[in-house]
Amino acid sequence: MTDRPLLLLDVDGPLNPFGARIWRPRGYVTRRVHPANWSARQKPGSRRLRRGLRIRLNPAHGQRLLGLPYELAWATTWMHEANEMIGPVIGLPRDLPVIEFDNLFTEDPDGLYWKTRRVLEWAAGRPFVWVDDMITDLDVRHVAEHHDTAALLLRIDPRRGLREEEFTELERWARAL
Ligand SMILES: [Mg+2]
């Protein structure tokens, strides 16, 4: 453990811009994979399941993320499969810490994003930035009220994924701590 802030990474949205209108945005590669949570939701024997989930990833992102003054961790429905299926494609080590969620997609009683409480618990008072496409103002407010150190929730547009401006913001935020 270091005294660097945490950078908590979602996959779908920030790293895999699933909403992009073009098939393969510049700098991205496509892969077909079979993550367990996705596979479990497909029709058994279906063509879709056979072909796998198509994702877009940017192989330059690993290097960029590793160059930032943060400690990286996964905060994604992919959980441990992020280390197996996402990390190697973008050049991240295969042993990043993983936030384990046992409440995938469940509704929160106060309308928070289902990841939010677990993310806070996992961060355990350490400064963190969380990049995710599903964060709402409610989550931002909740974190501000329940986390004693600095935290930044960066909502990423799933049509674009992580962009230059977010890398700049991440760099700036960590330096300003
Ligand atoms: Mg997402």
Image: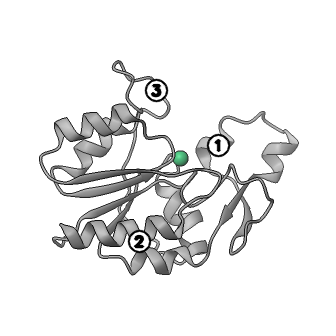
- Given this view, does label 3 or label 1 mark the residue nearer the observer? 3
Q: Amino acid at mark 2?
A: Thr
> Do the residues bearing badges 3 and 2 touch, measured as CB atoms within 8 Å?
no
Q: Indicate the quadrant where residue 70 lies.
A: bottom left
Q: Which residue is mark 1?
A: 38
- Mark 1 neighbour class, 10 Å CA radius: few under 14, some 14 to 19, many 20 or more: some
Q: Which residue is mark 2?
A: 168
> Do the residues bearing badges 3 and 1 touch, measured as CB atoms within 8 Å?
no
Q: Which residue is mark 3?
A: 106
Sequence-wise first label, 3 or 2: 3
Q: Amino acid at mark 3?
A: Thr
Q: Nearer the viewer, residue 128 or 154?
A: 154
Across and down, in percent, residue 69 comes to 29, 76
Quadrant including the N terminus: bottom left
- Given this view, does label 3 or label 2 mark the residue nearer the observer? 2
In the rendered image, the residue lying farthest to the top is 109
Q: Is residue 105 left or right of residue 29?
A: left
